[in-house]
Image: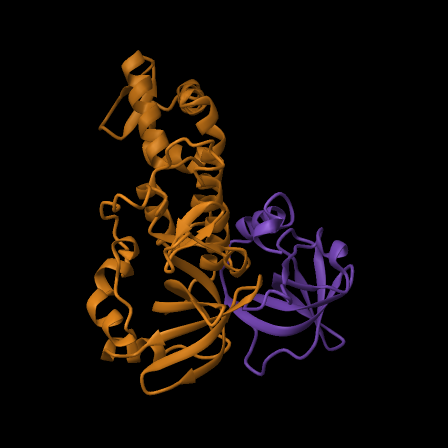
Chain colours: A orange, B purple
Amino acid sequence: MFSSSQFDATSAFSGGGFMPSQSTQLTDSTPSPAKSRNSLGVVPVTVKQISQASQSGDEKSSFVINGVDVTNVTVVGMVFDKAEKSTDVSFLIDDGTGRIGCRRWVTENFDKLEMEAVQDGMYVRVIGHLRVFQDVKQLVAFSVRPVTNFDEITFHFIDCIHSHLQNPKLQGGASTHPHMVESSMNTPVQNGQTITSNLMSKQFDVDGLRDCDQLVLDRLQQSSSIGQEKGMHMDELCQQLKLPMEKIRESIRSLEDEGLIYSTIDEFHYKAT
Amino acid sequence: MDTSKPAIFVNGALLPMHVRKRVRTVIQVVGADRGAIVGKSPDDLQLVVKGSPPSAPLSNFVEVIGIADSEKSIQAEIWTNFGEVFDTHSYNQLCQLANGEYQHLFL
């Protein structure tokens, strides 16, 4: 979202003297041979997790959180002790699990304007690099955005848990999907249902799609039995079953292939045979 | 970097486990009673929040951070208006996860 459209790598880094290495690119570029697919882009974390992070090997710019290399993180918390200087703005972020110092280099007008909107006591979402300066971990922020919809706070912490669960180590070396992780974390969720559905989808991964297919089929059979001629719209299934749309689509595809359901008035309405 | 003063996510059912500790929750304001604010916790239990609310009027949902001084009340240090609409169901589930098997990410 805001990462690709608003972030200009060269100007943000040139003022602070940090050279963007391949691993710190936000967008999912091909990882360099030295870095495994563990570099996940922007990772949602709590300050507590940052405090437990260790530095990864010889790469000073990279940290390891739960066994995964992490450089870019996002934190949501309250601003304290904002101090504006000519070249940078520093502040503390307190997310309820701890406090960490942040610094935003102010070289472009955009940076200055964005930081002017940030006040003490405000909830913000910070995206930045983890750095160590004089033995103290710090966040060098390149995006600081005030939170306007407070469901974002709930979302962020659930996202931290979700990201933690996506950890390849926890999955016993099974390949994770960095794209999936990135896309789910940058979108503040308006509707509470989406958050719980992301969590719920974890349960279905173990048994494959079959549980999901069964749920969709049951629901469609139910709707037929109460006389719904046109069947159900995919959105309705998504809302009622509280499952992510991709899972609903996959289930519909496999059920259709099996000949158990068919589309009715358009490609979004389905009915059980 | 300082993780010595965390604020634990609580709902009405979890608050008794954290008396005298620093907690945070979001209440739906129901009314005022003898100088304290009475509200509904994310799991629909009644909570009393003492302390001095900010001068600005409170919105429907308010986050309070402070010390739990009894099983049903919090002495709030920080009050933040969370607006008229808030997803208490998800917040409630977050409280349970943050106190349960994912506690190590928070405390």
x, y percentage for residue A30?
23, 45
Instruction: In the rendered view, tell whether residue B14 sits above or below residue A140.
Output: above
Instruction: In the rendered view, tell whether residue A270 sits above or below residue A1.
Output: above
Q: Residue at x 62, y 47 (%)?
A: B96
Q: Residue at x 30, y 45 (%)?
A: A34
x, y percentage for residue B53?
63, 78
Instruction: In the rendered view, tell whether residue A192 sits above or below residue B24.
Output: above
x, y percentage for residue A192?
46, 49
Q: Is residue A78 left or right of residue B69?
A: left
Residue farthest to the right, as pictured: B70
Q: Is residue B93 left or right of residue B11?
A: left
Q: Residue at x 35, y 74 (%)?
A: A104
- Whether residue A189 is visible to the viewer of this picture, yes or no, is no
x, y percentage for residue B1?
54, 69
Q: Nearer the viewer, residue A39 or B77?
A: A39
Q: Residue at x 73, y 64 (%)?
A: B21
